[in-house]
Amino acid sequence: MKILQKVCLVLLMGTFSSVYGGGCGDGDVKELINWTKRDVYQCKYDAKKGNVSAQNNLGDMYKNGKGVPKDYKEAVKWFKLAAKKGNVSAQNNLGVMYKKGKGVPKDYKEAVKWFKLAAKKGNVSAQNNLGVMYKKGKGVPKDYKEAVKWFKLASKERHAKSQYDLGIMYRDGLGVIQYDKESIWWIKKSAEKGFPEAQNNLGERYSEGKGFTQDNEEAIKWFKLATKQKFPEAQYNLSKIYLKEANQISDSFIKKEDSQDNKEKKNYIEGVIEKFISETNTENSTKEIKTYYLNTLRSSVKNLIVSSSKQGFDKSQFVLGLMYKNGEGVPQDYKEAVKWYRKAAKQGNFEAQYSLGEIYQEGKGIPQDYTESVKWYRLAAEQGYSEAQSNLGDMYRNSQGVPQDNEEAIKWFRLAAEQGYSEAQSNLGDMYRNGQGVSQDYKESDKWYRLAAEQGNFEAQRSLGIMYKNGVGVPQEENVSKEEIELDDDQKSEMEKKKQDYKESIKWFTKSAEQGDSKSQYNLGEIYQEGKVVPKNMVKAYMFFNLAAVNGDEVKIKSRNKVAIKMTPSQVEKSQDMAREWIRSHKQIEKYYF
């Protein structure tokens, strides 16, 4: 009876194998679909019988948890059995397990050994993997020429990833002469075969105009192809294009001056809208179409960023954190912002590290924590991010989360200032002016203030105004006039110098005041009220005191009211009209006053 059962089982397996083309012992397990428990049983049966293809496929099943529980050790066992019998797919798969340390301790040399065996027999995946090991110097000495050799062999067999990798080698001039045309040729070949990294690369090139004429439509085409495969970097890049379009459409609702730049934006948006109309056959008004298309773009941006973030792409995670912090496209939620900032920051994203430092310093939506703030600022600062370096310097200067250390503050301010960051330059100017952490040095202070002021930093502009107003670094004479005493040549020279200093002072205070700086506005009010070197002008003094008093500062309000007592009602009215006109002539600050 038992003999009969065995015969029946063998016959059954033979019949099953004939129906399914020989079972899982034929070809790659990925090509088999609609698997049942009987299929899995058949695969195990074939593998145990010594069928090397079945052993490799069974290993793949255990590796991916397909039809069986995921088990890397069991996968390695079956890959090794098939690999030792010369199955090239199994040799490559075993190499991957050693490279990644799955089911076995990570061992690059062992990985290279198996990749070489399969690569020499023509396995294109192994050839690519071997090329990568030579490029990165893992398990073998770094050798770009050897990497190129293996990438070329696989590329000739139309292996998409190898074509992309070869294109990158030509782009960077590694192991070959740098040659952009050859680089683009291989990357395009790879992209046309559907490799998402290559498609994303082409999208970036068209978007930035590198190797091609800048072409947004072509960029979107390639980004979309990669996005269909859920490639996170392409999703991020596509979201950037959509966001730019959304901002341009949003701006088009606002009437602006017809500058050349605005005309170009207007023409671009009109082209986008016309295309949208032709694709949707809509008969709605242009404004309705713009609104609908704007909302569609914003929704697409959110969906792309969320999808990319969930796949772990750090740049998208940072943007999603920013969206939650500002309540853009999602409800404002600082805790959610911190969550996504942290995910990106742990991957080394310096912008996310900086943003975490900022949110902990401010204590918005979460408990204020200077120690945590310093931790994240430092991580970003050590990567050379100038804003983090400047803020870290501030933490040392103000004893927030760290003991006060002016020398350490100077160190971080200088690193950021030398990169051209205006806030750090202004801070460094403060340190030299006040002799904090360094010997007092007005010339050095003036140098850093000027660098920052010329970039439009209002605090540095104000500081320069103060230095000129007070004649810092030059002898101070009493306020004298020709009517009081006869001036000798030296005194005349000094008086002219003071007049020149006041002109410079007014120049820098005005630049700062135009950005809404109330302290500079107050200083201008004082200059016109005192009339020491410039003619006294109570109307102008009231105007600037009035502007400065908007934030409710009592000192500034008292100064305004004190000046008003000395003025006629018509002068006060004139001055108030001047203040309103001054605000309207500086559009960038108008929203703060009206």
Image: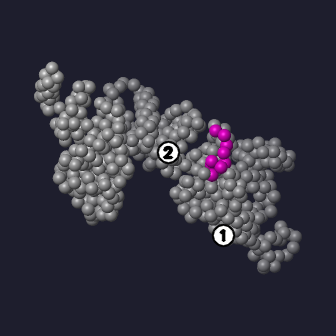
Residue at the farthest top position: 1
Task: Report helix, strand or loop for mark 2.
Answer: helix
Residue 106 versus residue 331: which sits nearer the camera?
106
Q: Is residue 92 left or right of residue 387?
A: left
Q: Is residue 571 visible?
A: no
| Residue 301 figure quarter | top left
Residue 306 spot, x, y in % from top left: 45, 36
What span is colored magenta in the figure? 366-374
| Residue 393 figure quarter | bottom right
Quick check: is 481 in the magenta stretch?
A: no
Q: Amino acid at mark 1?
A: Glu
Q: State whether residue 519 is above or below residue 570.
A: below
Rendered image coloring scheme: one colour
Task: Report helix, strand or loop for mark 1.
Answer: helix
Residue ID for mark 1:
444
Decide: few, some or many residues near mark 2? Use Cα within 10 Å; few <14, some 14-19, many ≥20.
Answer: many
Residue 553 versus residue 383: which sits nearer the camera?
383
The label on residue 344 is: 2
Residue at horizontal 80%, vertical 62%?
Answer: 532
N-terminal label among 1 and 2: 2
Q: Is residue 578 left or right of residue 186?
A: right
Q: Is residue 42 left or right of residue 110?
A: left
Q: Closer to the camera: disc 1 or disc 2?
A: 2
Residue at horizontal 18%, vertical 39%?
Answer: 51
Residue 327 spot, x, y in % from top left: 55, 35
Residue 128 versus residue 481: which sits nearer the camera?
128
| Residue 494 figure quarter | bottom right
